[in-house]
Image: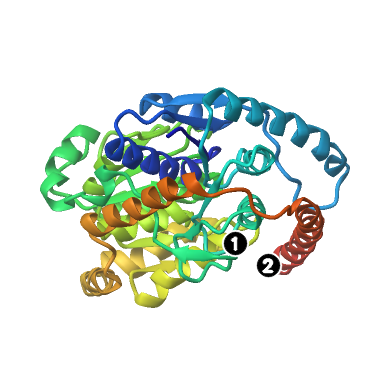
Amino acid sequence: MSVVIAGGGTAGHIEPALALADALRRAEPSIPITCLGTQRGLETRLVPMRGYELVLIPPVPLPRSLTPELASVPGRLGDAVKAVTQVLDRTRAQVLAGFGGYVAAPAYLAARRRQVPIVVHEANVRPGVANRLGAMFTRYVFTASPETKLPHATAIGMPLRREIAGLDRLALMDKARAHLGLRPDLPVLLVFGGSQGARSLNLAVLEAADWIRGAGIQVLHILGPRSGLRVNMPAAGPPYITLPYVDRMDLAYAAADFVLCRSGAMTCAELTAVGLPAAYVPLPHGNGEQRLNALPIERAGGGLIVADAAQRSKLAQQAVDEHWTQPVARREVANCIVTIQPPSAKQRSRQLLKLVRQIRDVLGVGPVEDLTGAARNAAASLATELAALEQREGRRRRRLV
């Protein structure tokens, strides 16, 4: 069995793909696994670090509105499909597993061309363009959320790496804080904006840094690898640790008491799995999927959603003061996290094994009916829908200003 995995760009696409790769390797130690990515994504570092072959293909970002860039998509998409087809032929791939992102759409089209069975996993409540396309070519479609609407979809949760799924935060807390340069006796606020960072979030917390430290709170602030920020905090007072990126997020979670972050699907899944309360600041653009990801957590009382449009200097203070520094509120949030009842490490292992079994099952699946014409029509309608979404989002942002 040879498997090609397509999931790149941000850690939200890469980490579940690598969690699947790890599970496949545990089930079949000799299985050949090839990961697809682009030069611009974090996969150039994360995939080789985990021991898997990475093949780079041309990126094909789809414009979210009808712009002149849309005219160049067919040519660039054709080049990417050709590159993926060569990978499928060279590896003699028997299944393609896609997790969305720039690499997924050409991977699905190439697999369709070569009649390689396809498995799709969608992390977000609102599915992305690539996975909506991929779902048309297969009946093996899986989602992290039962609310995700895709054909043939089965909700199995989010594939998580073992270090996160089996994390005992309390047992690792002292070691994690020592490793990261934090004190063992003061509460810790963890701040991060996803794998790429978030400028508005970074600036909001930096502007509130004096107030946060004055409240006796130490900060672990992951700025993002491309933030370009240089932070110099006074040595006096609680530690304020800034890092461009953290490979060992299990240590960051173990060190933290509360989190201020974006609400990508992977972030929401990991924080719920490890039992950390958080203030989620959804990305203010896109198709609104980040707010949908955090809504079930807020409804259960395990966190809150803070609008990115909130006055920057007050955003961090609101999140921390109202929902964390007050002991009663902190206990209530912690109790609500328990009521969400995230799957245990054993349950998540079963979820991953289910995906692995499905991948092994599809090896006997033959060609399905030709959906090429339907795919072209779907791509055109998706581009129109994206343009409409962008216009609505623009009107909403203007109302907030």
Q: In this view, does 84 lie to the left or right of 250?
A: right
Residue 42, placed above or below residue 105? above
Residue 370 pos. (x, y %): 73, 52
Residue 64 visible within the image: yes
- As measured in the structure, the alpha-carbon distance from the residue carrying label 2 to the one carrying label 1 is 7 Å
Q: Can residue 233 be seen in this view?
A: no
Name which of mark 2 and mark 1 comes first in the sequence.
Answer: 1
Name the residue at 37% across, 50% down. 357
199 or 206, which is in the foreground? 199
Q: Position of residue 344 (x, y in %)?
A: 23, 60
Circles 2, 1 touching at the beta carbon (< 8 Å): yes
Residue topped by disc 2:
400
Based on the displayed image, in which of its 4 quarters is residue 27 positioned?
top left
Q: What residue type is labelled 2?
A: Leu
The N terminus is located in which quarter?
Answer: top left
Residue at position x 43%, y 57% in the image: 316
Along the viewing direction, whichever of 130 and 212 lies nearer the viewer: 130
Residue at the spot 25% in from the left edge and 55% down from the top edge: 257
Q: Residue at x 13, y 48 (%)?
A: 185
> Residue 260 vs residue 103: left or right?
left
**Where on the picture, by quarter, is residue 102?**
top right
Toward the viewer: 26 or 357?
A: 357
* Residue 22, x across and y down, in percent: 33, 38
Secondary structure under badge 2?
helix
Q: Name the residue under label 1.
A: 309
